[in-house]
Amino acid sequence: MAESTPTTNGQATTASALPLGSREYAEYLTAQDPLKHLRAEFFIPSKADLARQTLPGNDTTTTSSHDESVYLCGNSLGLQPRRVSQRLQQYLSAWATQGVQGHFKALTDSPLPAWLHSDDAAAKAMSPIVGAAPAEIAVMETLTANLHFILSAFYRPEVGGRHKIIIESKAFPSDHFAVESQIRHHNLQPSTSMITIDPPTGTSLLPTSHILATIDEHASTTAVLLLPGIQFYTGQLLDIKTITAYAQERGIFVVWDLAHAVGNVPLQLHDWNVDAAAWCTYKYLNSGPGAIGGMFVHERNSRVTTTSSSNGATNGEKKGVEEKEFHPRLAGWWGSDKKTRFAMTNNFSPIPGAGGFQVSNPSTNDLTTVCASLEVFNLTSISALRAKSLELTAYLESRLLSLQKKSGGFKIITPSNPSERGAQLSVQLEGGLLEGVMEELGAQGVIVDERMPDVIRVAPAPIYNNAVDVWRFMDVFEKALTTVRKGRDGGKGEGGEVEKVVTN
Ligand SMILES: Cc1ncc(COP(=O)(O)O)c(C=O)c1O
């Protein structure tokens, strides 16, 4: 990296001449970023915005580039893409001028489809993000609801046979509740039918070998394995392909919760032969709080075959009746063939693929937002985003490690191997620091999130973050850590008489 680059004082320099911890080096990295133009696609809240108690109205400098906050929280809620409001406005105009006609009529000067086809448009846009055919994807409902729909179709416990569901012991509570309730729904008990994988003693990560050993232990009695693509607390990226194949060879149906993986790391759900998966769109997919979720069902699990029978024969006349064979599921009209859906008969004729698992007519509002957000992904590719993400997170890690060496006070619990993590690093603080550090960060316009009891999650999202964001975070974090430790230790500062967190 010996290229020349202008610095803030206007003089050309070489990257190697810049101290790695300097803002100038972060500016250099940002200037070299081939995806830097994508930041302009998003509203980056200013510090003044974050302090507001009222809506901005027309009189403010909202989201202008001066005084930008440092937003490293795409793991929780992604920022708003600017084109969302334009697309929503187009949808609202269609609704205002067309009323119910909008279901079937696309306006010729609008990029939006007739609402009837918004679900297909969203599935198509999602296809490169999750590595699946559009027909294997349904953009529908919400993450936990989709887990329920998947489990209700594919968890068919046999008493005395396969009845267990394996999940991790630190699963996101909603996944835990979904599994527990599914087990009870079948009149079984979580105490015997729910297997939770604990990390090996004294650690917080789940090595692949450890997961495979648990699968082996329960292989003949397990029906379903449900794991997170990326663990929400530690940021660990699991080896989806290996774990899926291993469990399937033992007759287990494999489901992934991709909340923290989708839009963050490349996924090949079809080629990895994943059975089914669910995700949300409000984190790295930037579609807004509580926005519609996604579901993947591998095409081999969602085929619909048609057979002819003579069951419908009347008056001795042989009459062929078509019968559909498909995997049983909780059904609704939106999963039924579009061509016959509005005939209002009581024959459920599922769409082959994940679309056949849809239940209700989806919110066009949400689908419009998801599609608008995915337009931004279409300006680049998941592999280009991943390449940037690897660099950005490595840069954050190197800054954290050098601060840790200097003053301690925290450790990174996310794997240090880049292929075992996404954008997020989880930083575990020494006891008694979390609240104070979060307050200091917030006061300086730095947005990250916390997970009790002692972790802050820092996630540079490659689609809108840059190295300067990381540098600014580190600047504030270092000061916050020093101040809060001093306060906690009664003015003694670093090295106070507290348990030190050891690096792993
Ligand atoms: C890993 C994981 N699973 C499940 C959920 C629950 O998602 P929802 O409320 O969309 O059902 C979340 C929410 O953040 C999550 O992070």
Image (cartoon, helix red, strand yellow):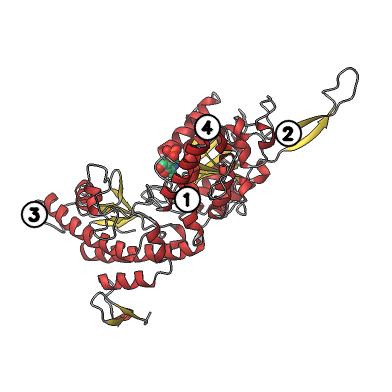
Earlier-in-chain disc, 3 versus 4? 4
Earlier-in-chain disc, 1 versus 2? 2
Earlier-in-chain disc, 2 versus 4? 4
Graded by Cα atoms within 10 Å as few (under 14), some (14 to 19) or many (20 or more), the crowding at tag 3 reads few
Q: Amino acid at mark 4?
A: Ser
Graded by Cα atoms within 10 Å as few (under 14), some (14 to 19) or many (20 or more), the crowding at tag 4 reads many
Q: Amino acid at mark 2?
A: Glu
Figure disc tally? 4
- Check if mark 1's residue and mark 2's residue have beta carbons within 8 Å: no
Mark 3 or mark 4: which is in front? Answer: 3
Mark 4 or mark 1: which is in front? Answer: 1
Q: Position of residue 76 (x, y in %)?
A: 37, 47
Provide the secondary structure element on which disc 4 rests: helix
Provide the secondary structure element on which disc 1 rests: helix
Q: Which residue is mark 1?
A: 372
Q: Position of residue 58 (x, y in %)?
A: 27, 48
Q: Is mark 3 within 8 Å of ligand 1?
A: no
* 453 to the left or right of 248: left
* Quarter of the render that holds ligand 1: top left
Q: Which residue is mark 3?
A: 491
Viewer can see residue 19: yes
Q: Disc 3 versus disc 4: distance between alpha carbons?
A: 52 Å
Viewer can see residue 167: no
Say which quarter of the image contains residue 219. top right
